[in-house]
Image: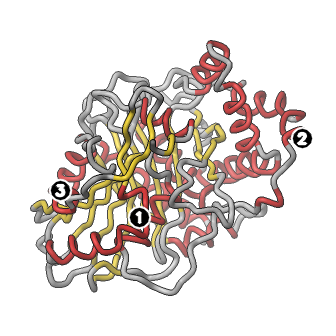
Amino acid sequence: MGEPLSAADARILALESEVVRGHALKLLVLEPGEALDLEAVRASVAERLSAFPRGLQVVVDDGDGPAWIEATDVDVAQHVRRHAADDPAALRAVVGRLMSEPLDRSRPLWSVDLVGPLADGREAVAVRLHHALADGLTAVRFLEAVIFEPHDAPAHEVGLRDPDARPTRWSEWERMPMTLARELAHPGSHSPFDRPISARRALAFVDVPLAEARAVGASRADHATINDVLLTVIAGALRRRLVHHGHVPRLNAQVPVSLHERGEDAAASGNRDSFVDVGLHLDEPDDLRRLDLLSAQTRARKHAHDARALDELFHALAAAGSAGALLRGLADDPREFALAISNVPGPRVAVSVAGRRVGHVYTSSEPGPRHALRVAAISNDRWLGVGFCVDPEAVPDVELLAEAAHDTWDALRAGTR
């Protein structure tokens, strides 16, 4: 008998369909060098996989619900492959195809694809992990355990919470009416991303210099975080594109919040996150003013522990049948949030794969029904890498969104000089 999936992991697995594949991508772009040896990478992954036990397990369902069991055999050659690409556009096309392909449920729910080499000598490693296997922080643990060359730097503690500082359950329920008023009582306009989706995916990426983003946040009267800067960059990109189309609606974004705690086994703890919803203030034409408005919202939600309170609420309602489903449906409505914007701390020091330094790291998560755009970010020691993922039939020209994000970042940086 296997280990049952947590309620959160089982719910994520159940969302998989013909148009929702259920996995996330971590894209590592290596600096120019000698081409990766496929067989050597396979051997390295096989040798280190035991450090991430979920990578050796499969999901089965014998009628009592999904459970993890040990795989009888893990053929690494089926999980680690190579694809040709000679320029950035071809690289994006390959990872778009990978995001559209389901992971094989008869095998462990991960894959590693080498892409390139590109004409300039760079090469990419595309790592897919099913979201039932790992959330953002756990996916970074997979990279550290299995993909990056070993190093001595401690794991990033951003997003890890002190279990001794956890509010009491009674205090969370006492604040629940105000939490619901803040999070679910301000629906936006009709979302331009409220579209039917297919299984096709298109991706685009943009970089924000990490030290400069930190400096922009620190320059504000009320200190803004890097995540606040990220939200502002994405909101500015949306405003620029929607102004181009002649209509700027009132939109909310769902921001996932990690509930992982220090000392837990991140590789085995499954999904431990909640969310808050923030208004993107697309009506505000000044990017720095929008940064202040967004920062004020996120600060208030952190102070009130909204994410943990909502997590407690949804856990309590999981067994409430139709009432719980009704509230979950409300929270997932595209007028409650038009798109999700996540941010995960990646490697805090320079890291390498097979002797090649990782120059850039990007992440991409799946859009969902009635949410045809998804934005995700991850940091390394120098950059915040932002990934836009869309169904190109519902949201064409994703590259223009990435360009608009770059323009917004330039405006923010120029405004603080």
State the image coordinates of residue 408 (x, y, percent, origin top left).
Answer: 48, 55
Instruction: Give the farthest residue toward the front.
Output: 1
Lower position in the chain sequence, tag 2 or tag 3: 3
Q: Which residue ends up furthest to the top in the rendered image?
A: 322
Q: Quadrant of the C terminus?
A: bottom right
Mark number, residue 207: 1
- Of circles 1 and 3, the one toward us is 3
Label 2 and label 1: CA atoms lie apart by 40 Å
Give the residue type that dot 1 points to.
Answer: Asp
- Measuring 32% from the left and 46% from the top, which residue is drawn there? 400
Q: Residue at x 51, y 87 (%)?
A: 152
Q: Which residue is mark 3?
A: 78
Work out whether residue 348 or residue 195 is closer to the camera in this orientation and state it: 348
Foreground tag (2 vs 1): 2
At 46% from the left edge and 47% from the top edge, which residue is drawn?
237
Q: Secondary structure at mark 2?
A: helix
Q: Assign the N terminus to one quadrant of the image.
A: top left
Q: Is residue 259 left or right of residue 26?
A: right
Residue 213 as seen in the image, left or right of residue 371: right
Say whether residue 204 is visible. Answer: no
342 over 101 or under it: above or below: below
Residue 261 - label: none
Image coordinates of residue 146 in percent, x first then y, are 37, 70
The one nearer the camera, 106 or 351, is: 106
Residue situated in front as seen by the camera: 55 or 310: 55
Residue on which the image places disc 2: 171
Circles 2, 3 touching at the beta carbon (< 8 Å) = no
Tell me the kind of residue under disc 3. Answer: Gln
Neighbours of disc 3 within 10 Å: few (<14), some (14-19), many (20+): few
Callout 2, which amino acid? Answer: Ser
Residue 121 picture quarter: bottom left
Q: Are marks 2 and 1 in contact (CB under 8 Å)?
A: no
